[in-house]
Image (cartoon, rainbow, N blue to C red):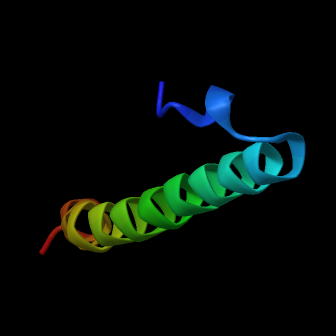
Amino acid sequence: MFGIESLGGSAQAAATVGAVLAEAITLYIGYGALAGVVGSNVLEALEGE
């Protein structure tokens, strides 16, 4: 995947935690932006504006 298999135990664990944290932050920002754009349009459609 990223070549972290060649690292030692502690370094491999830290790299895995870092990758998961980076993915979580990316998804949080992406879904937040998507909810902001789509959410307002859905609310306007439901309210009839």
Q: Is residue 25 left or right of residue 44?
A: right
Q: Position of residue 33 (x, y in %)?
A: 30, 71
Q: Position of residue 19 (x, y in %)?
A: 58, 51
Q: Residue at x 19, y 61 (%)?
A: 45
Q: Is residue 31 above or below residue 12?
A: below
The image quadrant that residue 42 belongs to is bottom left
Left/right placement of residue 49 relative to residue 5 reads: left
Q: Which of 34/10 is in front?
A: 10
Question: 20 or 37, which is in the foreground?
Answer: 20
Comparing 17 with 25, the one in front is 17
Side of 16 relative to 30 (left or right): right
Q: Is residue 23 above or below residue 43?
A: above
Q: Quadrant of residue 9?
A: top right
Tell me which residue sits at (35%, 62%) in the image.
30
- Seen from the viewer's position, the closer of residues 21 and 36 is 21
**Residue 1: image location, x then y, percent:** 48, 24
Q: How many marks?
A: 0
The C terminus sits in image quarter: bottom left
Q: Position of residue 47 (x, y in %)?
A: 27, 70
- Residue found at x 21% / y 69%: 37
Q: Is 1 drawn above or below residue 17 in the view shown?
A: above
Report the residue at 41% width, 70% height from top: 29
Hey, which residue is sitting farthest right in the picture? Answer: 10
Q: Relative to 43, does residue 15 appear above or below in the rendering?
A: above
